[in-house]
Image (cartoon, grey):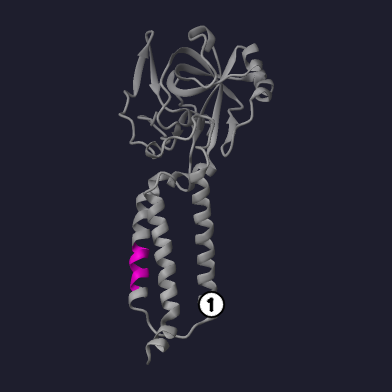
Amino acid sequence: MSAAANLRATLQDRVDGLCLLCLGGFMASLARSGLYWYFLNPKFSALTLTAGSALCLVGLALVLRPRPGKATMMRLMRQAALLGFLSLAATAWGQAAREPSPGAFDPAPAPEASRIPDPEPPAAPRVTKNGTEYLRLNLAELYIMLDKGRKDYPPHFALRAQVLRTPMLDERAVVMLRRTAVVCCLADSLELRFFASGLGETLPGVENGGWIEVFGRIEPLGKEAKALLKLSPGGEGPSLAVPNPKFGITVEAAQTIPAPDFPYLFEFREKEPFAW
């Protein structure tokens, strides 16, 4: 078989190999980038990197050692679909890289700071404030416990949150405490919120957007629920704002804290020690 004939006979295997190389390279590059969490949960990055590397090896084998065979319409359609997917994926990656960091927290970080940082050193699971012991957990963990109807939520707890204030909320001496929970990827994130009372008495002058550690307890919203829910401002994309419709937080103590390096929540535990 001549070289030209051999090339024609093995062309589809080589194209398959090139497609797999491109796909594997894209997956491996994405897994190593700071944009991975835009599309998938960061805990899957090692799996994506491994799968991408394996696809690169398989693709390279097809390119270097193709087998002669007849071209079929099914293989052409599969290759076209894969190339179309890669084009869309590359476009989405480029768009994410160009746009500012999503959410209402901080402007786009510098490239070297765009990666999800290593977990913070664990804090003590319980802390005593003014003679009362508080269990530390994050806002999403508390929200999930209440949403499931659990009765074993801590009577006194400590959590970190960003303050959301509006003139209408100020008139009622209420603020909103919020954190964004990323379940799968940023596109599926939820901005979870609680109405909170008593902050003005314990820590007056907290600005909108400020970060605080709250020491408090849960109180039913009762008859005020519908009126308060109407005062909840809309969220900023891509997250969906979800204020708790039944329960609020009574602040017993509070202190200002620096804004977290990475304000999103990825870990939610069902029991102590909580992720905080």
Count of picture labels: 1
Please tell me which residue lies in front, 86 or 216.
86
Horizontal and vertical percent position of residue 26: 42, 57
Which residue is painted at 49% across and 55% down in the image? 90
Q: Is residue 76 above or below residue 192?
A: below
Q: Secondary structure at mark 1?
A: helix
Prevalent SS, magenta region? helix
Q: Is residue 111 left or right of residue 103?
A: left
Horizontal and vertical percent position of residue 88: 54, 57
Q: Is residue 220 left or right of residue 214?
A: right
Horizontal and vertical percent position of residue 15: 44, 74
Q: Is residue 227 above or below residue 19?
A: above
Quarter containing the C terminus:
top left
The magenta span reads 54-61
10 Å crowding of disc 1: few (<14), some (14-19), many (20+): few
Which residue is painted at 43% across and 47% down in the image? 36
Disc 1 residue type (three-letter): Met
Which residue is painted at 38% across and 30% down in the image? 274
Quarter containing the N terminus:
bottom left
Q: Is residue 101 above or below residue 165?
A: below
Which residue is painted at 49% across and 30% down in the image? 106
Mark 1, residue position: 74
Q: Is residue 206 left or right of residue 167?
A: left
Query: Can residue 48 be seen?
Result: no
Whether 142 is among the magenta residues is no
